[in-house]
């Protein structure tokens, strides 16, 4: 209930300035639809921690119009959004052990992969994934801000 209230308040107060407001997908998988309703076609799926720029709100304030890092737009139900900060890889990117391009590579993620933001150190972000299948292991490390998109990426440069 608190999560729904927080997202609803974020949406209500953000309405005049949607261009700069972000939310993150809170479920492991969410449908992004062609219009505001469950009967609308699914355009694509978004994953947990995918950052979405909020660009509109349905009249009943239940559906949020969003845009992803590639500029694709669609609608998502507000209960599937969170204020947790997430980032999307804008290309295939190496996650490193420490905030340095010389640090060992912990893992590599593909373009579009969603990551949870943990902290910032200069132009580097500490991130972590959270796979639905816990047996696949968690990748935690550092990525340079130029290779990700999301609310924190906008303030790094």
Image (cartoon, rainbow, N blue to C red):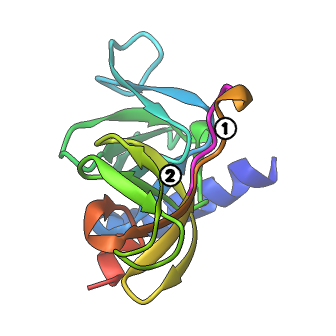
Region of the chain picked out in magenta, as a range: 128-133
Residue 132 in magenta stretch? yes
Quarter of the image where the C terminus is located: bottom left
Q: Estimate the x, y position of residue 151 in percent, counting from the top left.
A: 40, 68
Q: Which residue is mark 1?
A: 137
Q: Between residue 3 and residue 132, name the one nearer to us.
A: 132
Residue annotated with mark 2: 115
Does residue 29 appear left or right of residue 105 in this picture?
right
- Mark 1, Cα crowd under 10 Å, few <14 / some 14-19 / many 20+, is few
Residue 76: tell me if it is visible. yes
Please state which of the two labelled residues, at mark 2 or mark 1, is closer to the viewer: 1
Q: Is residue 40 above or below residue 70?
A: above
Q: Which residue does the image show at 56% across and 40% down from the upper left?
A: 48
Residue 23 covered by magenta stretch: no
Measuring from the top left, give residue 23's x and y in whole percent: 49, 55
Q: Give the image quarter of residue 78.
A: top right
Residue sitting at the far right = 1
Task: Point out residue 147 in the picture as x, y percentages from the top left corner.
Answer: 28, 62
* x and y percentages locating residue 46 in the rendered image: 43, 32
């Amino acid at each position: 209930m608190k999560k729904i209230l927080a997202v609803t308040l974020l949406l209500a107060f953000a309405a005049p300035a949607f261009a700069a407001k972000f939310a993150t997908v809170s479920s492991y998988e969410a449908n992004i639809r062609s219009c505001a309703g469950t009967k609308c076609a699914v355009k694509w799926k978004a994953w947990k921690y995918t950052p979405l720029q909020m660009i509109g709100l349905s009249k009943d304030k239940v559906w949020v119009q969003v845009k992803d890092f590639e500029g694709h737009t669609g609608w998502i139900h507000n209960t599937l959004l969170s204020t947790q900060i997430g980032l999307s890889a804008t290309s295939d990117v190496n996650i490193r052990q420490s905030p340095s391009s010389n640090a060992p590579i912990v893992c590599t993620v593909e373009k579009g992969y969603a990551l949870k933001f943990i902290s910032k150190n200069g132009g580097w972000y500490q991130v972590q994934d959270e796979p639905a299948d816990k047996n696949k292991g968690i990748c935690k490390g550092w990525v340079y801000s130029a290779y990700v998109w999301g609310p924190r990426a906008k303030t790094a440069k």
